[in-house]
Structures are given as C-alpha cells and as structure tokens.
Amino acid sequence: PLINLYGRQARDVSAEELEERAEKLLENMTVTKEQSEVVEKQT
C-alpha cells in the first residue's frame, strides 16, 4: 500500500529514493475500470 512510503525509514531517505519506491509500487498496482470510475466521480 502507499502508506508504506510514509514511515520512519522514509524520513531518512532522499526524495529520489522515495520516488523510486513509489514507481516500483505503482508498477505492481492494478486498477479496475470500476475503481477508476469511482475515483473519477469522487474527485
């Protein structure tokens, strides 16, 4: 989950490292059409 990017160990890493972690996390994330529609509706 994205919450893993925010934690004690995240405070001590560079912005580049956080970006790499986020990219790696997003590579493995899938979003269904229904989930996408809910997000679009709510934002």
Image (cartoon, helix red, strand yellow):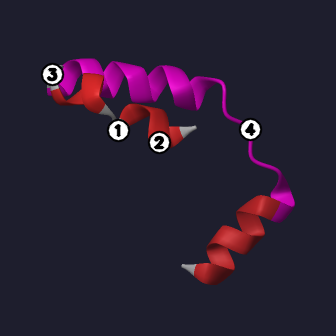
The answer to whether the residue labelled 1 contacts the one labelled 2, judged by CB atoms less than 8 Å apart, is yes
| Type of the residue with mark 3 | Asp
* Nearest to viewer (mark 4 / mark 3): 3
Q: Is residue 4 above or below residue 43?
A: above
What label does residue 12 carry, if any? 3
User: What secondary structure prevails in the magenta region?
Assistant: helix
In the foreground, 41 or 10: 10
At 73% from the left edge and 72% from the top edge, which residue is drawn?
A: 38
The answer to whether the residue labelled 1 contacts the one labelled 3, judged by CB atoms less than 8 Å apart, is no
In the foreground, 13 or 16: 13
Q: Which residue is mark 1?
A: 6
Looking at the image, tell me whether mark 1 or mark 3 is earlier in sequence order: 1
Q: In the picture, which quadrant includes the N terminus? A: top right
Magenta stretch contains residue 26:
yes
The answer to whether the residue labelled 4 contacts the one labelled 3, judged by CB atoms less than 8 Å apart, is no
* Nearest to viewer (mark 4 / mark 2): 2
Q: In the picture, which quadrant includes the C terminus? A: bottom right
Q: Is residue 27 above or below residue 6?
A: above
At 15% from the left edge and 22% from the top edge, which residue is drawn?
A: 12
Does residue 42 appear to the left or right of 13 in the view shown? right
Mark-to-mark CA distance, 4 and 2: 16 Å
Element at badge 1? loop
Q: Provide residue 42's location: percent of width, then percent of height.
A: 61, 81
- For disc 2, the neighbor class at 10 Å (few under 14, some 14 to 19, many from 20) is few
Q: Which residue is mark 2?
A: 3
The region drawn magenta spans: 15-34
Q: Quadrant of residue 40?
A: bottom right
| Type of the residue with mark 1 | Tyr
What label does residue 30 carry, if any? 4
